[in-house]
Amino acid sequence: MKEEQCSLLLSSSSCFSPPRGVRLSYGTSGFRADAALLQSTVYRVGILAALRALNMESSVTGIMITASHNKVTDNGVKIADPSGGMLSQDWEPFADALANAPTPQHLLQLITEFVKKERIPLEGVRRAAILLGRDTRPSGESLLEAAKQGINSILGVAAIDMGIVTTPQLHWMVRARNKGLKAHELDYFEQLASSFRCLIDLIPSEGRMSERDLTVVVDGANGVGGEKLEVLKTMLDNLFIEVRNSGKDEGVLNEGVGADFVQKEKVVPHGFGSQDIGLRCASLDGDADRLVYFCVPSSQGCSNIELVDGDKILSLFVIFIKEQLHTLSKEIGENTGSNYQPRLGVVQTAYANGASTDFLKKLELEVIFTPTGVKYLHEKAAEFDLGIYFEANGHGTILFSESFLRWLEARHKELSSVSKGSEQETAALRLLAVSKLINQAVGDALSGLLLVEAILQHMGWSIHRWSELYQDLPSRQLKVNVVDRTAVVTANAETIVVRPPGIQEAINTETAKYPQGRSFIRPSGTEDVIRVYAEASTQEAADSLANSVAILVDKFLGSGSF
């Protein structure tokens, strides 16, 4: 590394001393902590993103500053890889080392060694760009400036500020830029709106719904998603969106609102009440990468909701996709059609409700489990021609392989010439529209919302009909404070505890006491807690099982506080 580059790194890093006594780790959510602790970390992530871009041969990478569903005083930072996906897991150890280097000299040594090992060209011999985005948190602006300082400390790399955006928008922009496509916010909105319009136009006129059925009321979590949805809804026909908790009023980000709150607490968010009984409602999270639906049943007033979570969103998508693939495979007259059978796969985690997994398997689908975390789900889904993944919390997407898209485009072209207007050609058009509407870079609440609405209109379904696809098993989630979360080691997609010895056997003994009982534990990725999940045939049984397992965790690992 030349003297100019070394000097630049040493001088800029001296302005960003890491906080004492704090050690951060890069997980699925990137780095996340109290915003006051993150200046140094975000600066160093700027360096990391610049090196990643240079390593990928002048690709564009991205930095998103957000803490998603966390409280407003927290913040975080994560990198979007050139694919639009998450930072390659191979680089996470280097990210940890960078964030925790105690002095500028240590930082420079780490970078020098890594650059040499990875053969990353420095000194401006290669050019690269980093797209920067942030959510609406007050701390975001100063943290974004820290990221710029990090980027600017690597010669040849430019920082491009995309402003306040949702996390999925930033990932979409990175993916689009690296594909040579238009990648501004308006391009994002136009692609979603035109793809949605295409799907609606393909619905037979006799199947069109009433205006009340075309209305959805959306909780924006007082975050960036509500703000962006206000813009997007003006570009849509055949859908009436009412946005509440858009962040314009006095509401606080993620406080009593948002997809995480609604999904976990199973209660209505702030701003919703008896006036919404029977309406179709949805909730975004703080950075709009999660989506859940709900309605307020008249029999329960406004304290309880009928929740339609990520598992049921996945099920809806699967039914629609499977229907189009089946139609596409039908013979046309004497034509045998296509012999090509795309591989459709579903990816879940252990948090998926057992009833949803049973439902999917009855549809004769290939269901694969991975450890918790979007990076694992996304990676596994990419192995299919059509891979669909969702977490119960409402984060997920659909991935179309490049080879399947090429085949689909060719098949559509063939069908439009020999049987234009046929159900087979229409099915091909629908699938192509879905591939453009869904955000294939990452889970996206806005694109997901539009796809749900398009499919419900296509099916002629109410939210109640959708919710009745299957009956969720009652479940309960708890967390137990522990001294060291790394003491728990799991296997089999986090469904089995390998260490400490004896705890899995004890969990099995408790679980066997309950009809349809299932329980597992896993260490949190961000804090020293062990997360407990339990489900059973009744809510009382699920609560009891969760509590029993939590007591076991505390006995084996805890501080005696549970």
Image: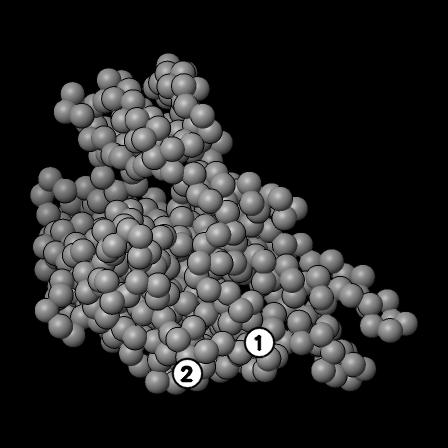
Left or right relative to 105: residue 181: right
Q: Of the residues shown, which amino acid type is indicated by label 2? A: Leu
Q: Of the residues shown, which amino acid type is indicated by label 1? A: Gly
Q: Find numbered disc 2 in the image and state the secondary structure of the residue it sits on.
A: loop
> Can you give x and y, in whole percent of width and height, for residue 388 in the image?
53, 55
> Can you give x and y, in whole percent of width and height, for residue 78 in the image?
30, 57
Q: Which label sits on residue 207?
A: 1
Q: Residue at x 18, y 56 (%)?
A: 256
Q: For mark 2, does the 10 Å Cα neighbourhood hold few (<14), some (14 to 19), or many (20 or more) residues? A: some
> Can you give x and y, in whole percent of width and height, for residue 356 in the image?
50, 45
Q: Residue at x 27, y 35 (%)?
A: 478
Q: Residue at x 31, y 81 (%)?
A: 231
Residue placed furthest toward the front = 299
Q: What residue did someone put label 2 on?
A: 236
Q: Find numbered disc 1 in the image and state the secondary structure of the residue it sits on.
A: helix
Left or right relative to 423: residue 452: left
The answer to whether the residue labelled 2 contacts the one labelled 1, judged by CB atoms less than 8 Å apart, is: no
Location of residue 43 (image quadrant):
bottom left
Q: For mark 1, does the 10 Å Cα neighbourhood hold few (<14), some (14 to 19), or many (20 or more) residues? A: few
Which quadrant, please, contains the N terminus?
Answer: bottom left
- Is tag 2's residue or tag 1's residue first in the polypeptide sequence? 1
